[in-house]
Image (cartoon, rainbow, N blue to C red):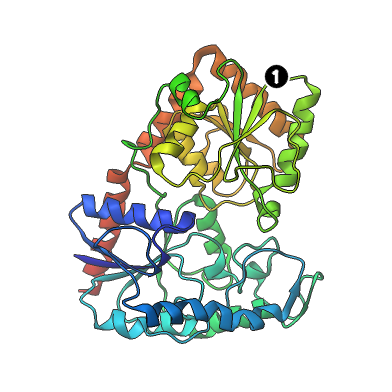
Amino acid sequence: MKIIHLSTSDFQGGAARATYRIHESLIEEKINSKILVDYKFLNDENIIGPANLISKAFIKSKPIIVKPLISLLKTKSTNLHSPSIFPTFWAKKLNKSDADIVHLHWVQKEMISIFDIAKITKPIVWTFHDMWPFCGAEHISYDDRWIEGYTKKNRPKNESGIDLNRYVWKLKNHNWKKNFFVVTPSNWMAECVKKSSLMHDWPVRIIPNCLDTDIWKPINKNFARELFQLPKDIPLLLCGAFNSNNQYNKGFDLLMKSLKYLKATKAKLNIVIFGADKPLNNIDYGYPTFYVGNLNDNQTLRSLYSAVDLVLVPSRIESFCFVAAEAHSCGTPVVAFKTSGLIDVVKHKITGYLAEPFDCLDFSIGIKWVLEKSCKDQKVNFSARERALKLWNQNRIGNLYKSLYEELISKKS
């Protein structure tokens, strides 16, 4: 059995990491798995990137060429938009290959066009890492156009200029006549697919993202705090850095409001921020704050998850959320909102706390509840680790994908 994955990158971003981890799980199952990428970072012979400087220059030019088209959409949204209309050679290359299955992942930055996806003749499995496949050009949607269909009447009032989302959705609707087999990492994403006007009758299976739980495991808390020069005698809350491009969806405003509620209770704690080595835009979290910078290797991130008492994920939408899953695998509970893919990751009052969306007072109550519970008996920590071992280990996920591939190959035969 030979599987060819198509992914914009093998490392940059959560979708790329999810793709590589799925690939690793297949290799463990003795499946011939290769990833074709536009941007290669990892030293793995099974990952095939651009062959020469000319190819690399062409790849980098594509997003720049379509940027003027995107700019014709006037919107207050800072979410990423991808037209995916640039002609590419991928369909021809994939059709000539000896692959049994073509497995698509996050293929934006004009890696492959809507038209070329339709030209792939091999059986297609497509793991959705965000909402783009069933939306217009947007990767995250807060309205119902993807449910109703993109019409002139239901365009958001905060948009003007060219209706890029309607244009791209119509291209998908016109070109994608055969049903690909969709995999989603969460129940929420699967329900979105079933409700969408574009893909409501497409086959869908839920297979979570996976982790190597032998790497993502707890280490001694005091030792981990020494590594980062963090205090040992006070609760530490971890959250990622925020910037102007992701503040709304990642819930920076919700986090700050929640911390204000928490401050009113006179709770004693410190904040730890990863993803930045200094305050961005003079942010004051209201508590002593430690910045540990960008952490790109698994061992360092594992140590950080082990060093803290709690991870905060105030996102409005997550297809799955690796931060929460990785924290759980390291035995660290998570507080998040009861929304989207986070519902599949965090088990309320068992591995953390799911606050009502988007109730910041409840979020702050969740922080106090987890800290008190964790200090009392560590049961929530053990439950978090057990959840990761049971649901997201590579062996389980590799076998789930293997069964799906075998099913599709059998049907083709």
Residue 157: give x, y in percent of width and height.
82, 71
Q: Residue at x 47, y 40 (%)?
A: 325
Q: Nearer the viewer, residue 337 or 190?
A: 337
Residue 316 visible here: yes
Residue 151 visible here: no
- The quadrant of the image that shows the C terminus is bottom left
Residue 246: give x, y in percent of width and height.
65, 55
Q: Is residue 398 above or below residue 311?
A: below
Q: Residue at x 53, y 26 (%)?
A: 229
Instruction: Give residue 143's quadrant in the image.
Output: bottom right
Amino acid beneath label 1: Lys
- As drawn, is 101 to the left or to the right of 250? left
Q: Is residue 354 above or below residue 243?
A: above
Quickly name the residue at label 1.
Answer: 268
Q: Is residue 162 above or below residue 235?
A: below
Q: Nearer the viewer, residue 246 or 324?
A: 246
Residue 42: give x, y in percent of width and height.
34, 58
